[in-house]
Image (cartoon, grey):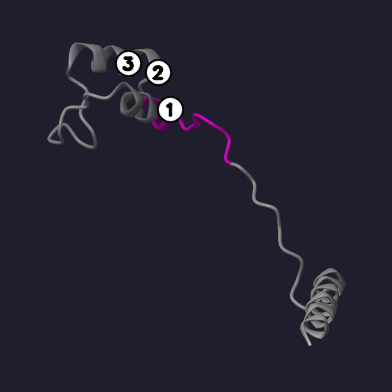
Amino acid sequence: MPGFKPTMHEWKEGTLHSGSKRGPIVTSQRQAEAIAFSEQGERRKPKNSKKKRPAKGSVKIRRAFAAHRSQVMSHSHEED
């Protein structure tokens, strides 16, 4: 398994291909880095973990909905 340095060396020489050896030659340094990291089995940047949504019907959602509903109702009475 080639490491990071050999892959980047291939890119500098102009012999690094995307996919197989029949694939197009990689010209972008960022693409070469992505290939090098994927061959090492690593990621360039850690993935952002999304905040988990509360379960449907949870107390947090019901309270938020009730607060929103009370705001909407109070605004609709002011218009009259």
Give the mark count: 3
| Left or right of residue 54: residue 40 | left
Q: Secondary structure at mark 3?
A: helix
Q: Amino acid at mark 3?
A: Met
| Left or right of residue 22: residue 18 | right
Mark 2–mark 1 contact, CB under 8 Å?
yes
Q: Which residue is mark 2?
A: 4
Mark 3–mark 1 contact, CB under 8 Å?
no
Question: Which mark is drawn over residue 50?
Answer: none
Q: Which quadrant: the C terminus? A: bottom right
Q: Position of residue 38 (x, y in %)?
A: 41, 33
Decide: few, some or many residues near mark 1? Use Cα within 10 Å; few <14, some 14-19, many ≥20.
some
Magenta segment boundaries in residue numbering: 36-47
Let me know if residue 38 is in the magenta part.
yes
Mark 2–mark 3 contact, CB under 8 Å?
yes
Q: Amino acid at mark 1?
A: Phe
Q: Which residue is mark 3?
A: 8
Let me know if residue 40 is in the magenta part.
yes
Q: Which residue is mark 1?
A: 37
Q: Amino acid at mark 2?
A: Phe
Q: Position of residue 17 (x, y in %)?
A: 20, 29
